[in-house]
Amino acid sequence: MDTAPTLKIAPNNAAFHTLAADIFMGALNRAAAKNGPIRVVLPTGSTPLGLYRELIAHHAHRRDLWDRFHYVALDDYAGLAPDDRRLFSNWLARDILTPLSIPPTHRTIFNSAAPDPSAECARMDAQLDSNGIDIAVLGLGTNGHIGFNEPGSAFDARTRLIHLSADSLAANAAYWGGMDHVPPTAYTLGLGHIMRARETILLVQGPHKAEILHRMLHDPISTALPATALRQMYNVTIVADQAAMSAAEPSPQT
Ligand code: F6R
């Protein structure tokens, strides 16, 4: 079986978000064919914001799907109080979960303030081992990270506490108005969990992602570039805009 990711290319910014929403809704409908909760990993960051707006504006009426939707955290900062607005769980609550009326009981999130990070990782591992992931929506870091699986992360890694790399600290500074506001440590699901997702959608947008997308698709598969792990997975769709694809593929499949 071929594990090559499927590439879907949008010509511009607006088309990127509608294409991402269509592909996401397709995955959600497929996942709904099984019984029970539909467990979905969602990223924060700037790339998925248009997708979330699109889902709220045009797909909120699909209560048959949203009532079964269960958000599973991909990553989050460590050591913050539950009401800290920087928590990714709170960011996603504001931008998608609350607008789509996903109740707190349908959210598997990190307890950022957990006194024992190892126990917190073990709790998430147990959740993921029992329930798995139906759909993983992911973003691509400019250093090739997936979640906070920074370069060097093992492909079978489990949930763990990490120190943000310099690249990730700088990227996150843009969200919170400077480096001083970025927590230095974070929890992340390991690639070992993410790679077992039944379907994966990687969102890549903008010219600043062109080089890393090209490397992700063409460099040797290696822990030095965590996103290359997606080339060993089945059912991966990469949704990119033309700007991100410019360096990646000579003749993209649309
Ligand atoms: C965020 C996350 C990160 C981002 C990635 C891309 O929860 O896990 O891996 O998806 O850094 O971020 P943006 O979209 O801001 O370029």
Image (cartoon, grey):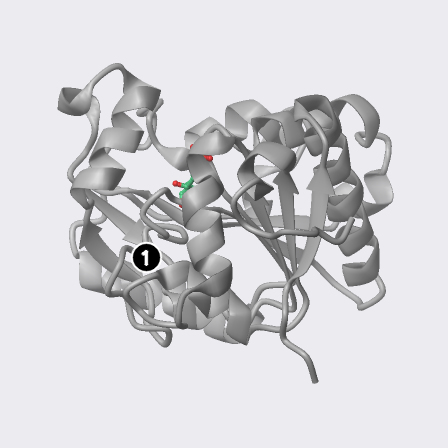
Does 124 sit left or right of 246 as displayed?
Answer: left
Question: Ligand 1 is in which quadrant of the figure?
Answer: top left
Q: Name the spot of residue 154 as percent of width and height, x first.
A: 30, 72
Q: What residue type is disc 1 on?
A: Asn
Q: Which residue is mark 1?
A: 149
Identify the residue at horizontal 36%, vertical 48% (top origin): 110
Q: Nearer the viewer, residue 219 or 63?
A: 219
Q: Secondary structure at mark 1?
A: loop
Q: Is residue 222 above or below residue 44?
A: below
| Count of residue discs | 1
Identify the residue at horizontal 49%, vertical 31% (top origin): 207
Give the residue at the far bottom of this rendering. Answer: 1
Identify the residue at horizontal 64%, vertical 30% (top origin): 52
Q: Residues within 10 Å of mark 1 (few under 14, many from 20)?
A: many
Q: Nearer the viewer, residue 233 or 162?
A: 233
Quarter of the rendering containing residue 121: bottom left
Quarter of the rendering containing residue 142: top left
Does 136 sit left or right of 125 as displayed?
Answer: right
Q: Name the spot of residue 123 as percent of width and height, x first.
A: 35, 64
Residue 112 visible in the picture: yes
Identify the residue at horizontal 52%, vertical 75% (top origin): 232
